[in-house]
Image (spheres, rainbow, N blue to C red):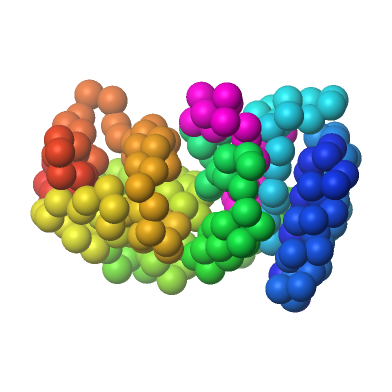
Amino acid sequence: MRKLLIVDDDENLAWAVRKKFESLGFEVLTAVDGRSGAELVEKEQPSLVILDLNLPDVDGLDVCRYLRRRSNIPIVMLTGRAEDSDAVVGLELGADDYVTKPFSLNELAARVRAVLRRSVTEPIAASAAAEPATPRVVCLEASGLAMDPRGKRVWVDDQEVQLTPTEFRLLQTLLENCGRVVSQQDLLRAGWDYEDSDTHLVEVHIGNLRGKVETRGKPQRIKTVRGFGYRIDADA
């Protein structure tokens, strides 16, 4: 059974969200502030966190930053209409998606399920040093980038880098279409598995991805084709 954690101090909203996801077969945990939410993530290892940005003790953006530094757990943020800039910052910090209040429970459920369908989470306490070495299996390679889709591993100039599940899906789509332009809408479908007109998600996550796979002093690997989308060439 998939386990969700809701971090929100609005008890009425948290109750409604909990009931919705329980009806869909999820186990649901709740926390009313950032600190207890972070503790529950480490203790319970949920499959996904629904995180409100307005919390009574710690800024939701700080919670997002803390969680992303420690794991690749999917995060869906809840934000008010006046906080669109905060939502963009949250995406830059590594959140996978966001829903603007007021929202329908069906919309939230659709976004959560879309993120979960395509996500591979890593345990909070995972230690690379404690894991046995695994052979490098490369199936996709271009422009100094190498990817093992089954092992969920990526190398940049022979150095392994860690990507979030969303970043991994976007890079995989670009590599699978090496030399061709991939539109923002196609990347949105690849990264989040639903139709949406909000290309902020793609733009911010591509920015995050570039920060991990580009090499200073070398030609840009992920090229922007203005008005069309993004492209990775065989040789940058």
Question: What residue lies at 20% left-to-right and 30% top-to-bottom?
Answer: 218
- Residue 124 location, x and y as percent? 72, 51
- Residue 142 location, x and y as percent? 20, 53
Please tell me which residue lies in front, 124 or 110. 110
Question: What residue lies at 20% left-to-right and 53% top-to-bottom?
Answer: 182
Q: How many labels does the image show?
A: 0
Q: Which quarter of the picture shows residue 93?
A: top right
Q: Is residue 73 magenta?
A: yes
Q: Secondary structure of the magenta portion, mostly?
A: helix
Q: Taking 121 as reference, is 179 left or right? A: left
Q: Taking 149 as reference, is 25 left or right? A: right
Which region shows up in magenta?
63-89
- Residue 220 location, x and y as percent? 20, 34
Q: Is residue 22 above or below residue 97?
A: below
Q: Is residue 30 above or below residue 59?
A: below
Question: What residue lies at 50% left-to-right and 55% top-to-bottom?
Answer: 165
Q: Is residue 231 above or below residue 177?
A: above
Question: What residue lies at 62% left-to-right and 48% top-to-bottom?
Answer: 103
Q: Is residue 137 magenta?
A: no
Q: Taking 85 as reference, is 55 left or right? A: right
Q: Is residue 22 above or below residue 168?
A: below
Quarter of the image that includes the C terminus: top left
- Residue 122 location, x and y as percent? 63, 57
Residue 215 makes an appearance in the image: yes
Please tell me which residue lies in front, 210 or 116. 116
Quarter of the image that includes the N terminus: bottom right
Residue 77 makes an appearance in the image: no
